[in-house]
Amino acid sequence: MLGSCGEPLARVYDLAMLDLDGVVYVGDHAVGGAPEAIDAARALGMAVAFVTNNAARPPAAVAEHLSALGVPARADDVVTSAQAGARVVRERHGAGTMVFLCGGPGVEEALLAEQLVPTADPAAAEVVVTGYGPDLPWRRILEASILVRDGRPWVATNADLTIPTSNGVGLGHGAVVKMIEEFSGRRAIVAGKPQRPLLDETVRRMAARRPLMVGDRLDTDIEGAQVAGVDSLLVLTGVSGLDDLAAAAAPLRPTYVAADLGGLLVAHEAPTRVASGAWHLNGWSGEVVAGELVVHGDGAPEDWWRVVACAAWRHLDDTGRPVALGRVRGSVPWCA
């Protein structure tokens, strides 16, 4: 079920680990209110890190993009899956390791920063690192797959099957990972969300004691937070919406839910369950009747979503089946 926090999250947690697309920006535009919320969270003493599975762009390029959107950022504020992957290689194999580079400039820069040696020579490679690169030649993927099949240790920056492009959703690096895994019969060590190296690297870099993961995707951001053992805030400005939230199994459930990054600036109250089985919160009441979710009352939109989440999750846990949502679809206060 959801958690409660009696003070603004930005006062209780010392670091917000912000996913980017769908949380801070959508394409070339900042999410409404995101720059102002980030400024306000910082003013309350919360540090901010921008955490991305995208391994293609170096941190400086990401920081420049954010700053152009009105979100001041330095390269040191950005942590990528390429950096997390390079850290994994450094920790396991040591500085100076020869790494077969099957990725773009962001991956190469991350390897060099960890004192690893990128190479395009398969004969010299001790480890294989793969990551997204829009201009990656097929020969490089072919050579990487053979090295993996023949036993070289393999780190993949992320396993995202899709990426946003100017022409719509496209194939992500995860498609390459699946292909190499099927060909080689071996599994990649994945650095990006939902695996924990990326969040561990962010916490280490920022010296955080009580971090909070903030994302819009249950299957990467929120699951990644659970894998890393940190609390999470789901914002409904990106991918996940009503159906995803209501059907979320326990490993995909956030600690908190908010409309947007303004959720960092307020206290969070969880619904309570009464003897009848209904969930109540600040004017809203939700219960499951004959397998269908019913919500009555009036109040803040965020509280409606919290009631829906708790009622739906309890039904899923008790029955093993997602709740029917037909009766609440027309009353959604706002949608992602």
Image: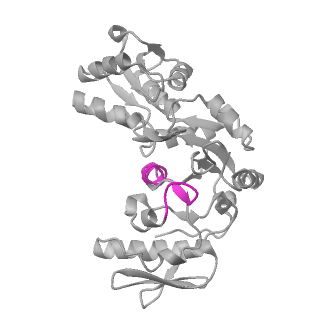
Whether residue 220 is visible to the viewer of this picture, yes or no, is: yes
Whether residue 82 is situated above or below residue 218 in the rendered picture = above
Task: Give the quarter of the image for residue 176.
Answer: top left
Residue at (63%, 81%) from the top-left corner?
299
Q: Residue at x 40, y 24 (%)?
A: 129
Residue 224 magenta: yes
Q: Determine whether 44 is above or below 121 in the image.
A: below
Task: Tell me which residue sits at (34%, 26%) in the image.
Answer: 154
Question: What is the number of callouts on the image?
Answer: 0
Which stretch did the figure color magenta? 219-241
Q: Nearer the viewer, residue 288 or 139?
A: 139
- Outermost residue to the right: 43
Q: What x and y, as percent, mark residue 107?
A: 50, 25
- Who is closer to the viewer here, 270 or 102? 102
Query: Is residue 127 something that shows in the picture?
Result: no
* For residue 92, side relative to residue 320 (left or right): right
Taking the magenta stretch, the answer to whether it contains residue 2 is no
Q: How is the image coloured?
A: one colour
Q: Is residue 53 above or below residue 31?
A: above
- Picture quarter with the C terminus: bottom right
Residue 211 position in % (x across, y down): 58, 51
x and y percentages locating residue 274 in the rendered image: 47, 88
Estimate the x, y position of residue 326 in percent, counting from the top left.
42, 77
Q: Looking at this view, name the residue that lies furthest to the front.
A: 167
